[in-house]
Amino acid sequence: PRSPINIIRLPLLLALAAIAHCQAFSQAFAPLLPRHRSSPLSSAMRPARARTPPSLGGLQMLRNEYDLVVVGAGPTGLTAALSAASAGKTAVIIDATPKRQVQFSGPTGLYSKALRDTAKKIDVGVLRNMGVRDTAVWRQVQEMTSEVLKESGLSNLAAIQASNIPHLRGTATMTGERGEGGAHCLDVTFLESDRKIQVQGQNVLIATGSSPWRLDTVHYDDARVFDSDTIKTLNFLPKTVAIVGAGIIAIEYAKIFSRLDCKVTLIVRGKSLATALTRIGIDPDIALELQKDLCLNKVRIIFDAEIDQVESLPPGSDTNRPLTITLKQPGTGVKKPHLNVKSHVLMTATGRAANTKGLELEAAGVELDKGGNVAVNGFLQTTLDNVYAAGDVLGPPSLASTGIEQALAVSRTMFGLETEGTFGWRQPDTNYDPRSLMSDPLKYPIGIWTLPEMAFIGSTQQSAKENGLGGAEGVGEATAYYGNTIRGKVQGLNFGFMKLVYTKPEGKVIGVHILGEDACELIHYGTALAQSGKTVQSVLGTMFAAVTFHELFKAAASKAVLDLDKARWIKMVKKTDEADGKADGKIQITALRRGLVEFGVQQDDIAKIILPAEEEGQEEIKQSTVIARLP
């Protein structure tokens, strides 16, 4: 029989590629994944013989007990189910995607990415000037975005079908009961019929994701007033949009709607957008630049305000009639009538909460934390044996990328796939619970799909200093600008920059921050640098393809190396001053020349530093003068 490790390698690799690149998945993955089924499995890997399968009307289940029951069909749930199938285990997916929405369409944020891409392709202002009606424009926008979701859903559906993974469209409830052999029992209520069926699993993964928080002061009708999920049901092109929030999602949508020629108002509870962004790890200079860019794109930002009341309009009201949104000061409740907003659409993006309602987790013995998220240990195990959780249902960082890694970690734990040298292997001390992930800023990169993009990994200079992450001489940062690169000049770019944060004097990269074109692609080289402990000097020794934005790395690294060299030279100058026993701020020119040569300072630079004093016949030179003349 084949080794279980060999069985999982290729199919699992392809499965992950499918989640990340769903457009190419059905061609690459579907014909390959199921081939291992024809090979005999070892007794340890062979699925148990099914007992009498339950039936429901015309539905016949393949079995009533599975090695893994996955509740939730986002990227996290799909990855776990595909991993189990690739290891020769049986899995079933329970998914409560509403009937009107596309199943398996990927992460919640995929809609905003598709809308963003569409906004880049369509110039609404030009179309309006040409006399094209807004209804026709929005119909085109909807078709282009829905096509992305549809293709993603079909690709992921092909993956689970190729792996013979059944999926049930309904809601799941943990009963707290155990079947024969100790399997957990879950009741599944189908969305279309309200009929029930029971499914049993030796292991259960809760991967139900999260939903937006809704404000108590707002009535959401999902026609004119939306949260950041239901905004995808917007059925007209609004002339004005009001967005509540100061986080990543709020800013993404502010830039998208601005690009769609909508007048956007951003309502921020705090007194600064930069404060909210730096709290999640964004560099302060990037936060300020982003705020400036929003203003340049005519996004009105109202600070120190929250919603007091939103006018209710009867169903079917003319979409040309705007809502009246009254504001108040946070904390005090003082009304701000001079800041009232008229807007055709309101969207709130003020955070997300774990989807645990109706699962009866606590009744079954699964604990939730104070925030309502599922509580897990370092192995993502809940307080109930053989029940695991992964993805947004755990709380921060709430990213598709970390959810996928958590799903792989769960599969390794469940099915013993930690053999060193295989695709499923990770360092044994690597944990993926929220606390472990959030404790180290180098664990994962973050991409933010604004226009243009923003991405980062690791520490800012400020946070590195606060957390004592710098070297013996502190922390440095070096900035390179898109407009100074060859490609930037070719494209006429005058916006955007990259920062490298590094330790002194070692030059180890501990942070990379990018605002500009292709930032979400460039960050992965930055991730490789920071996670492997590379130095800015090593960046200069790397050869990149010409006329690419990777020139930013070399430009920033060059500045960093020059800064480190200058710091070394300053230290040498001060030691030379102290060497004569006077430490009077004056240095013997002959000793200074010798020291500069030993430190590798170019002769031309040495001449610029020393020659003026020599020409005047001086034997000594002021320390401050030398430092000022250093290159």
Image (tube, rainbow, N blue to C red):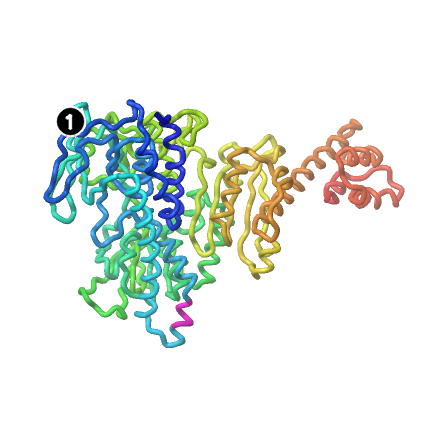
Quarter of the N terminus within the rendering: top left
Q: Residue at x 43, y 61 (%)?
A: 120
- The residue that mark 1 highlights is 179
Question: x%, y% of residue 365?
Answer: 20, 28
- State left or right for residue 115 relative to residue 553: left
Q: Is residue 523 above or below residue 442?
A: below
Q: Is residue 579 magenta?
A: no
How crowded pointer 1 is (Cα within 10 Å; few <14, some 14-19, many 20+) is rated as few
Q: Residue at x 28, y 31 (%)?
A: 89
**Label 1: element kind:** loop
Question: x%, y% of residue 491?
Answer: 56, 60
Question: x%, y% of residue 100?
Answer: 22, 54
Looking at this view, is 70 or 256 the one in front? 70
Q: To which quarter of the image does residue 138 belong?
A: bottom left
- What span is in magenta? 123-127
Q: Is residue 124 magenta?
A: yes
> Furthest residue to the bottom?
131
Q: Residue at x 30, y 34 (%)?
A: 85
